[in-house]
Amino acid sequence: MARAQTQFESFHRQILFGYDSSKELRERRDALLEDLKNNISEDAPPYTTFTQGSYALDTGIHPLGGNPDMDIGILFECTPDEHPDPLVLKKYVRDALVRHNRTVSIRRPCVTVTYTRDGDPLHHIDLAVYSSNAAEQTQIAWCRESTPLAEREWKPSEARELTEKITSRFSGTDRDQFRRCIRALKRWRDEKIGHKNTPSIGLTVAAYNWLEPRTDSLDGKPIDLHAIRDLVGQMLARWIGTRLHVHLPVAPYSDLFERMSDVQMDDLKNRLMELRDALNEADAQADTHEACKILRKKFGEDFPVPEKSDTTKQASPGVSTSGRSA
């Protein structure tokens, strides 16, 4: 059988968006935080900042079409009772960051700073605004500038706790495989799902819940093909009626796929079934060249296909086994 592990790892290096590939965006982030410190209103409470989202989890990918992002949390030292209108704090952040080379807008979950080049989005940084309630639970400022006062709200959102849970789920080479599999699923989603309601965090938490590391029983080397295939199988096995439910493991414990319509959910299920079948078909190939041709159809042009003359080799007699989680 062809496992294409070399190609999975090459694919991962090609699509990952991490520390080495984010120098420009990190510099933008640092400049934003410096502007925030220097320009924020004197009426604003003190605050601390932290990185969140896929950059903090080390599961980011280069998006198709460009415009990568970074997520920053701004935790103000106040309670929702002290600032019942969350828009006030979001405006403090927005007003401190407005510059000629940026577009700064208040969206419902965050303040978004977008950088453009020749009129096209280059990358963006999302800054989520938080406070802590009396129980020291973080609350996110949830409103647009146009949201009526009565509908502006503080909602439970434990972003730092989520990062800690996910990053500590595995260790060592199991963690490496975990991140490769998440990135591969994200790129598959970008290639094959034609709507935006299948969020990356939903796929990440599905992997947090159900991925089991897979390795060769003889040499202990990872087998990403089996790990992804078995994860997809676990997701399909957990469909309840017409829907798959994937809940955040921290407050507010919401269903990450709740915004998907039944039609979109049916499409996701069909696409996952097609992916599972393709992974099984690739696994059954004796030639890595043929296996990678199948995989490229699901993961896109960045998935490498080696020359046929280099890939006709005897398959390893080992079997896939589960790894150990931290």
Image (cartoon, grey):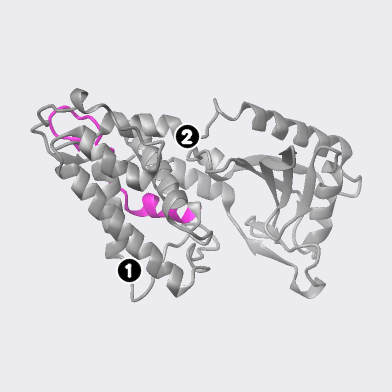
User: Mark 2 — residue?
Assistant: 16
User: Depth-wise, is mark 1 or mark 2 nearer the camera?
Assistant: 2
- Residue type at mark 2 is Leu
Which residue is most to the top?
Answer: 310
Q: Is residue 171 above or below residue 268?
A: above
Residue beneath the point at 13% across and 36% down: 286
On the image, the x and y values in percent for residue 132 come to: 69, 55
Q: Is residue 324 visible?
A: no
On the image, the x and y values in percent for residue 85 come to: 81, 64
Q: What SS does tag 2 mark?
A: loop
Q: Is residue 128 magenta?
A: no
Q: Is residue 161 visible?
A: yes
Horizontal arrangement in the rendering, residue 167 relative to residue 94 (left or right): left
Residue beneath the point at 11% across and 34% down: 318
Residue beneath the point at 34% across and 32% down: 304
**Residue extent of the magenta highlight:** 201-224
Front residue of 111 and 130: 111
What separation in Å lies between label 1 and label 2 (alpha carbons)? 29 Å
Other residues around mark 2 within 10 Å, as few (<14) / some (14–19) / many (≥20): many
- Residue type at mark 1 is Trp
What number is the disc on residue 239?
1
Q: Is residue 203 magenta?
A: yes
